[in-house]
Image: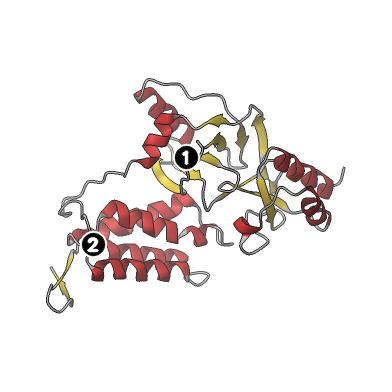
Amino acid sequence: MSGHDVLREWALYCAAMGWYVFPLVPATKRPAIRAWENRSTTNHDRITRCWDSGAFNIGLATGPSHLLVLDCDTVKQPGEVDGAEALAALAAERGVELPATYTVTTPSGGRHLYFTLPPGVRLRNTAGHLAPRIDTRSGGGYVVAPGSTLPEGGYELEDDTDPAPLPAWLLQALCERPTTTSTTSAGPVARPSAYAASALRGECDEIRSAPPGRHNEVLSRAAYRVGRLVGGGLLDEAHARTELIQAARTLVTADCGCTPPEVARVVDAGLAKGRTQPRTVTSRQGSEVAA
């Protein structure tokens, strides 16, 4: 069976599971089409025509598929805890066991754990929210489906158990706002000022339009500037962090090697540095004054 045939059969298999698929550039994790979430499909004929025309890897749009996928990554430095260990620790803290569920191994040695969402529940992607080395993909996100291959290896089906319902404790943990500690933060901000909210939107727009080759620079600078507002008590850090990471989703899907854990690391470092140089805004003119 040719590479085209194998990938087509995997794409059709995913569609038969009720999962919406779309093509990725061959041998990469990058979408081969624009508006991939809206154009993802379970239609047999569309899938057949697409994969007959090229050996595309398979993107699985988690939102339309009503899935949440836990992406448990491997460690990069000795002594760190990997995603699978962190997830097991979270379960142990709550005195529960993780259910067996559909599991795919990744070329880097990580694992994708598939869960179904309760009716009416829609979750967003997260990066490091549950724990370091654990990201999630749901509404607005995608994972590389089994059968796909990268130069360093393939996405292999490890456990074909039907996806388990997302455990209630995991749903609760994903809905909790992350807590942060800081020696300079003045505490949560219930409602940011118009200036601070506008500044955050502007920095997020800068991130989304970051030119190739400057992703890390633009993201780090934006996080630093936002961190200054957090340090000045003008923005809630958890909210700002979430907005910055969501804006950086476009960097993750670009052909630059950016990963969700790296994005989270850069954002956290920029925010922490910015907090040490807090910024305030005069209430009358709205002009910026360094604290």
Instruction: Give the label on residue 199, or none.
Output: none
Q: For residue 182, say whether it is visible.
A: yes
State the residue position of label 1: 75
Q: Is residue 23 left or right of residue 74?
A: right
For the residues labelled 1 and 2, the Cα–Cα distance comes to 36 Å
Amino acid at the residue labelled 2: Pro
The image shows residue 122, relative to residue 167, as above or below, that is below
Where residue 226 sits, quadrant-wise, is bottom left
Name the residue located 63 percent from the left edge and 29 percent from the top edge. Answer: 162
Where residue 192 sits, quadrant-wise, is bottom left
Q: Residues within 10 Å of mark 1 (few under 14, many from 20)?
A: some
Foreground disc of the pair 1, 2: 2
Q: Is residue 68 left or right of residue 181?
A: right
Tag 2 or tag 1, which sits nearer the N-term?
A: 1
Q: Quadrant of the N terminus?
A: top right
Where residue 198 sits, quadrant-wise, is bottom left
**As rendered, which of 38 and 57 lies closer to the eye?**
38
| Residue 214 percent across, percent down from the top left | 47, 69
| Residue 182 percent across, percent down from the top left | 20, 50
The image shows residue 191, relative to residue 20, as above or below, that is below
Name the residue located 61 percent from the left edge and 36 percent from the top edge. Answer: 105
| SS state under label 2 | loop
State the residue position of label 2: 192
Q: Residues within 10 Å of mark 2 (few under 14, many from 20)?
A: some
Q: Is residue 73 left or right of residue 6?
A: left
The image shows residue 246, relative to residue 143, as above or below, that is below
Q: Is residue 122 left or right of residue 158?
A: left
Amino acid at the residue labelled 1: Val
Q: Quadrant of the C terminus?
A: bottom left
| SS state under label 1 | loop
| Residue 6 percent across, percent down from the top left | 80, 43
